[in-house]
Amino acid sequence: MNHKKSNYQIAISSLTNARHDHYDGVNAIYRLSAYAKIPESTCKDGFERQLQKIMKNLSSLSVYPNRIYVQDDKLEIDWYPKGYQMVMNRGQYAGLLLEFAEFLNKANMRDLVIQDGFFGDDPEESVKSMSNDMINFFPEFNSDCFGLRDNNSIEIMYC
């Protein structure tokens, strides 16, 4: 039996699987990520149609992703923070990821799953030299805190 973890289970696994520097009150959040599997038997034309459908679906979401990484067997979809988003402890990080899981589950896209590989990412920016008024210490998964800025488009990268 192939038991697939739900987005909520993956979000909760951040309590033990995410690096400490993702929720240490020193480093800003680098990204949140999900993926959609590409069926093995998909031909090139079928893949292009699937990518266009996914782009259309992503464009209808309340929080637009920043990038799609096209890989052999999946599309990795990344949401980057707007400004400095930082959580102060493990529970706050898990709460943010539960919001992300809820967002993915409500998206009109089948099989969109949290890509837990970002639990091991190196944080990109330390906020030690930032003033507190530049940092959001209580990020939520919404368009104020994550995703594309106005007038930008989703970047597609082929790996």
Image (cartoon, rainbow, N blue to C red):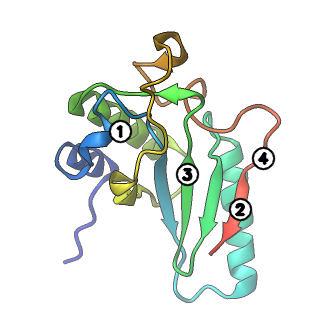
Which percent across, then down, holds residue 26? 35, 30
Q: Quadrant of residue 95?
A: top left
Q: Residues within 10 Å of mark 2 (few under 14, many from 20)?
A: some
Q: Position of residue 130 (x, y in %)?
A: 50, 21
The kind of residue tagged 1 is: Leu
Foreground pick, 26 / 9: 26
**Distance from the alpha carbon under mark 1 to that under mark 3:** 13 Å
Residue bearing the label numbered 4: 153
Give the side of residue 51 with respect to residue 82, left or right: right
Identify the residue at horizontal 35%, vertical 27% (top origin). Answer: 87
Real-space CA distance between mark 4 and mark 3, rounded to the nearest whole angstrom: 13 Å
User: Label 4 is placed on what type of residue?
Assistant: Ser
Q: Secondary structure at mark 4?
A: loop
* Cα distance between the residues tagged 1 and 2: 24 Å
Would residue 141 appear left or right of 1 to someone viewing this image? right
Disc 4 packing (10 Å; few <14; some 14–19; many ≥20): few
The quadrant of the rendering that contains the C terminus is bottom right
Circle 2: residue type: Ile
Kind of residue at disc 3: Asp
Residue identified by numbered label 2:
156
Residue assigned mark 3: 78
Comes first in the chain, label 1 or label 3? 3
> For the residue carrying disc 1, how many other residues have a C-alpha within 10 Å: few (<14), some (14-19), or many (20+)?
many
Q: Give the distance between the C-alpha atoms of the residues marked 4 and 2, in whole angstroms.
A: 9 Å
The residue that appears at 72% across and 50% down in the rendered structure is: 154
Can residue 89 be seen by looking at this rendering? yes
User: Cβ–Cβ below 8 Å for labels 1 and 3?
Assistant: no
